[in-house]
Image (cartoon, rainbow, N blue to C red):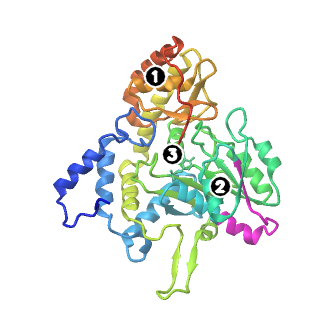
Amino acid sequence: MDRMFPETGRDWDDLEREMVEASRDDLPWRSGRTHKAAFHASEDVIDLVEKAYTKFLGENALYTALFKSLEKFENELLGMTAEMLNGDAATAGITTAGGTESNLIAVKAARDYARTHRPQARAPEILCASTAHPSFNKAADIMGLTVVRVPHGADYRADVAAIAEAVTDNTVMIVGSAPCWSFGVIDPIPALAELAASHELWMHVDACVGGFISPWVRRIGYPVDDFDLGVAGVWSISADAHKYGYAAKNISTLSFRNAALRDLTRFHFEDWPSGAYATNTFLGSRTGGSIAACWAVMNYLGTTGYEKFAAISMGAVDRLKAGIAAIDGLALRGDPPVTLFAFGSDTYDIFAVAEAMERHGWIVNRGKAPPSIHLIINPVHAPLVDDYLADLAASVDEVRRGHNLAADARVSYAE
Ligand SMILES: *Cc1c(COP(=O)(O)O)cnc(C)c1O
């Protein structure tokens, strides 16, 4: 076997060259030609985030008591998030390493709540629409729960009546998405929260992708249905700062209606030679960099900065939706109110269209059921809307004229 570990160290120039070379075929996420992994507002935001991150890269957020800076950044960024999500003085939250961890911890809190408040739930179940994120199944897999996924309605939103039918003694939690990733539509959160309240169930809103965009979209005048802590009966809500917050990975927020619910996230252990060990997260050691960078970017942009970026993205969304509607045979999936959506066709093989778009130099996100092209719009996409629509019209035309044969039908989000 070839040795990988160099016996003598290599200098930075040598390493940098190899790193740049290694990244040559990476997804060009800053280019505006991809809609995956491209949460990108502007270059000055990235510069700021990079500076703030590296300043606190070595600080360990496991020890907030030792790093008052991180405690301050975390408290303040959670306070700003609570304001953004219509919380009040009682709102209490934690930061996590991402949407997946936020949802995992929401499930842990709901499970622990049910242990004392819902003894009839012998085999705890999470109830959600089929569009809920896979992290709820990951949570169930790790923590020994079951997820009951109820088919979404014709409008791609959660079917509240069908979910109501599915409530059993084992139900401990109802999850709604605001919005769901696949179609960008917001589940009827007030109705789901009312259902949860009527059974005294934990209501969690997965606003991982929408939490940092929907409030600003609404503030600039677009209609967005209620989805956040302003809805009575919502007990927890996850919102990823490393998506539309434009922070560096890894950071998400998980906000609770009050501190008592938040404290259910706590893991506490004493029986260890080094003494007490308590955390609110799945991770132990974690960098202070992502917390510092998140705090910095929220303060750098302020509410008007986020509104400005929301306006740029929504302007692009409006033009894209109109342009897609104008192409014969293409249709949006449902009525998505913010910056992500999917479209497909009853006339053409949409994956053949996707492949044609790839020949035009776009990196295309696909959806599986129903077959769709998925867009998640950021400010970086706005200057390319006309190019995108022109290439889309040309691609549909190519497919119509039979230029595309068997398109690959396999769809993958992440593997
Ligand atoms: C992105 C996303 C998640 C998970 O987020 P990660 O940051 O990838 O862990 C959860 N729910 C929804 C709706 C998302 O869009």
Mark 3 or mark 2, which is nearer to you? 3
Residue at x-position 77% and y-position 60%: 200
Q: Is residue 118 magenta?
A: yes
Tell me residue 380's x, y (percent).
38, 35
Q: Secondary structure at mark 3?
A: loop
The residue to which callout 1 is attached is: 356
The residue to which callout 3 is attached is: 414
Circle 2: is it few (<14), some (14-19), or many (20+) Cα within 10 Å? many
Amino acid type shown at disc 2 = His
Name, please, the residue furthest toward the bottom.
Answer: 273
Residue at x-position 46% and y-position 86%: 274
Indicate the quadrant containing the N terminus: top left, top right, bottom left or bottom right: bottom left
Mark 1 or mark 2, which is nearer to you? 1
Q: Earlier in the sequence, mark 3 or mark 2?
A: 2
Q: Earlier in the sequence, mark 1 or mark 2?
A: 2
Q: Which mark is residue 374?
A: none
Amino acid type shown at disc 1 = Ala
Tell me residue 235's x, y (percent).
66, 59
Q: Secondary structure at mark 2?
A: strand
Tell me residue 159's x, y (percent).
74, 41
Judge from the rendering whether residue 344 lies leftward or rightward of residue 320; answer left or right. Answer: right
Q: Nearer the viewer, residue 1 or 406?
A: 1
Mark-to-mark CA distance, 1 and 2:
40 Å
Mark-to-mark CA distance, 3 and 2:
24 Å
